[in-house]
Amino acid sequence: MTIWVASVGTAAAEWLHLSDPQRFPTWVTAFLILSALAAAAIVAIVARHAAERAAVLAELVEALHSPLGWPEPTHGLITASRWKPAPRAVRRAHRIYPNKIRMHYIPAAAVKQQSSLARMYRSSTEDESAPTAEANPEWLRLINSLLTENLGVAYKLSVDRRARRLTATPDPQAGEDDEPAAIKRLRAKVASPAMFEAGAVVTDYTMSEKGRITKFTVTHNISEKLARSSARTHQIERIMSKILAGRWRAEFNLVDDIAEFELRPSLPRLVWPRIYPENDGVAAAIANYKHTRFIYAFDEDRNPISWHPKTVPHRLIIGPTGSGKTSTIHTFVTQAARAHWAVNIVDRKNIEYRGFRDWPNVQCVATRIEDQIALIYRMWMLMKQRYEAGESGAARTEDFAPVLLVLDEFTELVKDIAAWYVKLRATPGLDTKKWPRELPIEEMVGSILRLGRTARIHVIIGMQRPDVKYVEGENRDNLTGRQSVGRLGRNGADMLWGDYYTGTTIPPGLLGRGVAYNDHGDPVEVQNFFTPDPYKPDDLTDPTAKRVLKALRPASFSHPRIVFATPFDPHQDEEFHYTDYLEAPVFLAEERPDLDPLSDQYRFKPHVGQGEAFAAAAALGPDRSGSTATVAPPITASSRRQRDTSSDRWPGYGAPAPRAVDDLQVGDLICVDAGLGVWGILEKPPEPDVVDPTAMLLSWRGADDEYDLLTVPADDPIVSRALLDDDQQEAA
C-alpha cells in the first residue's frame, strides 16, 4: 500500500506537469511528489501499527480460543482497544499491549472445560445484565494467566453474562505482585542497609529469555556516602555478585543518584589471533606505518588491546616460564611479518623461535651468542646510518622501512654475553690489554630504546621478571608499552604498574592471562592471543592452530634471510679481535649455506652422537662414558626458578599459617573451605561488613577464575599463604 500510494502520487504529479506545464510548473510538481511521499510514509506508519496490533490479537486468539469454548481460532473472537507501549522491563515479542480487551465465550463449552466444583453463575435470581468477576474463579484465573503470559501485563476480568463477553483491563493493584520472584527479591535486597539503604528502588530491569536478570537500574539517596568512600561502591558490587548469579559491575552516577548494574563478562581461556590483510610489499609497509596497529589481546568487554608503534615505539613483556609470554611475542612477530616489516629475533633459549627461521620477512633468528652480538650491533649501526642519512638529506624518515627487533630473555642474554666475553678475553696467547672490560651491548640496546623511534626501529624486550634497569629511570620512559603475562609478585607489580596489587591476583594455569594498558592508559586484565609455535608439534594438534598459522603466514617475501660470518673457532684462528664479532660481515643466507642453520652445510651445527642423543632424551642416570668424576653445575637463580613445582597447585606462596584478617594483603592465598581444601586468591583488601559490624568481607578468586565472597569474624584468624616475590621464591 505504501509503494502504491507513492507511485500513484508521483505518477499523477508528473502527468499533470507534462499535460499542462504552465498550470503545473516544476515547483508545484515537486510539492505534489513530496505530498505523495508524506502520505506514503503515513500509510506505512499506520500499517505497521495495525500489523503489530493484528499480530498481538492473532496470538491472543490462538492462545485463548479453546478456553473460551471455541473449537478453532475465529476472526473477531477477541477485540482490543486503547493500545499503549509495553513497559521496558517486560521483554516480549511485541512492544504494545491493549488497555481494554473484549473476549466472546461459549458458556457450555467453558463450563465443560473447567472444574465441576463451581458454577458459572452465582444464582439464577441475579440480574443477568450485571457483570461479575466471581464466575468460576478457576476459569478466570486460567484466562488471566494466559493474558499475562502473552502480553506481560496483569489484567482484571469482568463477566457480562447476557453478552457472553469477558472484559479485561489492566490491574493497577497488581504492580509488583505479578513481577518475577527474582525481581521481588532484588527490590528487597537493594533497600537493605548493606546496599543502598531505605528508599532505594529498582526503576528498570531487563531479563533474558530464561528469566535471568541481565541489567537493572537503582535510584537511591546515598550519593554522599558513596562519594566519601570508594570501598562502599566496591562492597555493593561484591554483595550484588553474591546474591545474584555471575559477576556484577555498576556505573554510579552520583549526580543523578542512579546506579546502573550489568553482568560483568568473563574472559575466555583461549583467543586465536586476528588475521589482517597482508601489506603489498615494503612500499605498503612504509605508507601504512603511521596507522599500523598490532592487536594482541582482548579485555573482559571484548575490546581489542593493541600496540601502536608510531606513538609507543617499544614494548616490555614480563612473564615467567609457562605463562604464555613467548606465545604473545609470537603474535607480534607474525603480525609484523605480515605487515612486511623486517623482523629480527634474538632467541636466548635457542628453541623458542626456531619455527620462524623460514618465516617470510623474518630476516634472522639468532641462537648462537656470537650471532646475537653481531645482530644487536648491526641494528645499532643501522640506526646510526639512518640518522646520518636524514641529517645529510640523503633520505627522509618517511623513507625508512620499519624494523622489529625481539630480545627475549634479555636478562639472561646480558649475563651470558658478559660471561662469554670474560672467556674470550682469557684466550691463551691473545693480547687483550686494550680491550674494554665488557662489551657495550647493553648500552647499544639502551641507545636504540632512546633513539630508535625516529629511525623506525622498534624493540620488544622479554623478561621473566621486572628488572630495575628497565622499569625505572630513563628506560622506564622509553619502554612505555608494558604488559605482564601470568601472576606478578608485589615488588614486580609496584615496579611495572605503580602499586602492589595489579597483576598479583591472576590464578596459576590461566595461560595468556595478564595485564596491559588499554586505549585509555589504564592497566586492565586481558587475555592475550595464542599464536602457535610452528616448531612445536603439541601446538599443532588442534586443526584450528594449523589453519591459523597458514592464514598468518605471509604470501610473499620482502626481506630476505641474512647470516653473519663470525670467527669460527677462537682457539684455532691465528688472529682475531673482539670487533670481529661486533662487525661480522653479513650475507644473504642463500649466499653462505655454511652459515645458514637451515642448510645441511651449516658449520656451527653441534655434533651429537647416538649415545649422547639417547642420554639427552632419557631420564637422569649415571654417566656411562667412562668418566668417573663429574662436576655438579652451580645452583643459579635461573635453575632455582625452573625447579619442578608441579606438586603444588598454588606455587609461589608461603607455607599455610593462621593470620589476622587485618594482616592479609591483596594477592595472598586464603583457605575458603578447609573441609574441601578450597583455596582462593584475595582479590580486594578486607572490608567491614555493613550489616554485621563484627564481621569482615573477603573477596576471593578461585583456581578456575570464579569469584565469590567470604564472611569471617573480624577477630578470628584465617589460614592463609602469603604471596612470595621472586627473590623469596628462590630463597624458599
Image (spheres, helix red, strand yellow):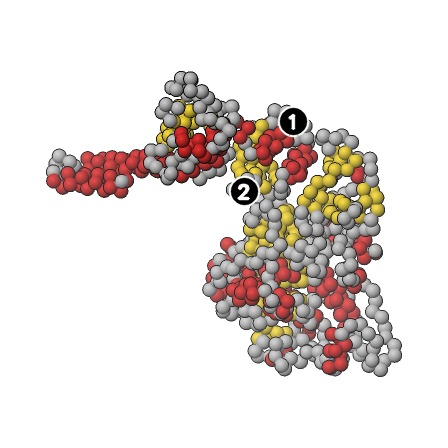
Q: Quadrant of residue 623?
A: bottom right
Residue at x 64%, y 47% (from the top left corner): 523
Instruction: In the rendered view, tell whether residue 463 sits above or below residue 169.
Output: below
Label 2 residue SS: loop
- Classify 10 Å Cα crowding around label 2: few (below 14), some (14-19), many (20 and above): few
Residue at x 16%, y 37% (from the top left corner): 25
Q: Can you give x and y, in whole percent of width and height, for residue 586 in the image?
A: 61, 74
Residue closer to the observer: 629 or 445: 629
Residue closer to the observer: 12 or 710: 710
Instruction: In the rendered view, tell whether residue 100 sits above or below residue 527.
Output: above
Which amino acid type is marked by label 2? Lys
Residue tagged by mark 1? 197
Q: Is residue 475 visible?
A: no
Q: Can you give x and y, in whole percent of width and height, for residue 338 in the image?
A: 52, 63
Q: Quadrant of residue 698?
A: top right
Q: Is residue 352 visible?
A: yes
The N terminus, quarter of image: top left
Could you say which disc has been placed on residue 455 in the image? none
Instruction: In the rendered view, tell whether residue 445 sits above or below residue 227.
Output: below
Q: Nearer the viewer, mark 2 or mark 1?
A: 2
Q: Can you give x and y, in whole percent of width and height, for residue 662 in the image?
A: 79, 38
Name the side, left or right, on which 104 lies relative to 551.
left
Residue at x 39%, y 24% (from the top left corner): 161
